[in-house]
Image (cartoon, rainbow, N blue to C red):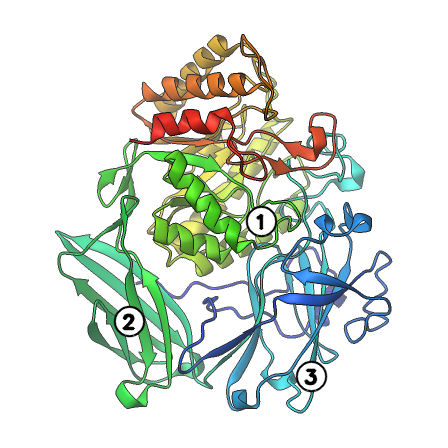
Amino acid sequence: MSGVLPVAASETVGQAAGQAAQAGAPTRRSGLLLPQRNATRDLIDLSGLWQFQLDPTDEGEANRWFEKLPAPRTIAVPCSWNELFDDAHDYLGTAWYLQQTWVPQRWKGSRVFLRVGSANYAAAVWLNGRRVTQHFGGHLPFVVDITDAIAWDRANVIGISVENKQLPERVPAGIANGGGAMGGGLTGGYPLTTYDFFPFTGLHRQVVLYSVPSTFIDDVKVVTDLEGTDGVVHVRVDASGGYNGRGIARLNDVDTPLTFRSGVAEATVRVPTARLWHPGDPHLYPLTVTLGAGANVTDSYSLDIGIRTVAVRGDQILLNGQSIMLRGFGKHEDFPINGRGLNVPLVIRDGELLKWVGANSYRTSHYPYSEEAMLIADRLGFLIIDEIPAVSLMFTDSQEILDKRLAQCQQDIEELITRDRNHPSVIMWSVANEPMAGLPLAGAAPAAAAAVSAGTKFFTQMYEHTRALDPTRPVTLVGIQSGPVEWLQIFDVTAINRYYGWYALGGRLDQAAEALSRELDDLHKRLGKPIVLTEFGTDTAAGTHSEPAEMWSEEYQVEFLKRYLDVTATKPFVAGLHVWNFADFKTGQGIIRMGGLNMKGVFTRDRRPKMAANFLRSRWVK
């Protein structure tokens, strides 16, 4: 068993040294276990109504807005502020959240933590006027021990500042000096971004207070294997304070002793004739680990695990030793009103629609999704390519900028793996989407050799770092059309986005199919790895029809998808097809994004099926 996966501190790249010095305690470097309530633990979900105020001049910290806002209004947490307030629709600067809460007296003697599920992009947290932590990089949780800052005799004041300024050293990167390689954004729209989805901002997931015993289970790591028909489950438990003592790992109604030395215990549990986790039967086994045993249990933690293996052999992806074909979509966390804010009913509904259309997988494009989404994927049997927010990285930038982005990407993958490694649904890590060494979709225009070399060094480091953190899953990078093949060579699975028939050869579907077929053959001959087509699609205005099929019509979307499915059906090395996109999603305003929407969904933004959804169902449901 490898060591516990580290989580980078909250004080990270792209920030002034003075800021870092005032940041307070860093977020914890160890586990990011989902908080739960049981006999030894408790929690308070602070989701609901908070006070809120925009801070366009960044005066809030100097004027102590973390204690009292001068002109607050009410906001919901979680949500994106951009979809709630007209004056904040395109606002990405600093804003402040304020909440008051009592901490129960029964928590005295416990350790108390504050957990922010997602703050996009940069956040700082105050408790009772004391700055306790800061964190950079959205979409992943951060946790800080606030035990020593709690007021037990009055309501505690929690202040959180959040901003999503589009700065070039961030991940995803902003546009330097309002320009950059794209001359004003990926689609020339507003707000200016280097990526083609809306830069939603705010507290996007729950803010939770939780208590644990003074000595507690800090992390659990599970790795499963197969020996014949038996499942083999390796469990590692990390406890706080260098705990030395005994515990229990209960799996399949069998108790296995744990012996902790310096806070670490490991055990291997055999499950005879195991019921394996796979899309057709996503069986989950309950696992409970404890400190102490019997009447002397001082802490416990429970999670559901799936027994399964993932591997790459030749040009196949194997699940439990059997070749699998990924069928599904790229998606977005995006819905009217709440923006990217957690919407649990939508997570459930999307799962139902994925099953209805016959999908068995999706990619978390282009950032980590909620923990609720991962839990539903575990339960419904969806195979997940789990992706960090490294979208549209440009390698013509300075080495200083690239070094800062590498540090942030390494932090992101560390946090993502620590959060999601126990989910059987997660079968692959993706370290970037559509990195560029020049203008995208540039056809035969040669990429700059220096940019290709810089990207090769960058992604070699990312691959090695990710594999060291988790050697049990393949690692991929999603390549842009006309992007450097050298970068694809580094990874275990070849993942590519292709738009022949839309951005290239638009309206010429027969030629598009021929071009796709040639490139797939060439890539396979050169790389010899399984290929997953992670994006292909057309913008389609729901209700627009034409005969013969023309671009933007529902008929054209169906014909486009039919060509891609037919071509790839003749390529046994194609191991997956992810249509772009599951549902229409919000973008910035622009001349190629009518209504500020990318309309490549086979469902509308409010989840009404287009003709393409029914076509895919006819091909995928057996």
Which SS class for mark 1?
helix
Q: Is residue 129 left or right of residue 288?
A: right
Q: Which residue is mark 1?
A: 406
Q: Position of residue 61 (x, y in %)?
A: 81, 69
Question: 363 above or below 102?
Answer: above
The Cα atoms of the two marked residues, 2 and 1, are separated by: 32 Å
Q: Which residue is mark 3?
A: 155
Q: Which residue is mark 2?
A: 266
Tell me which amino acid carries mark 2: Glu
Q: Position of residue 5 (x, y in %)?
A: 43, 63
Q: Quadrant of residue 49?
A: bottom right
Which SS class for mark 3?
loop
Instruction: State the residue at coordinates (69%, 88%).
Output: 154
Q: Quadrant of residue 263?
A: bottom left
Which SS class for mark 2?
strand
**Which mark is nearer the camera, 3 or 1?**
3
Q: Is residue 489 visible?
A: no
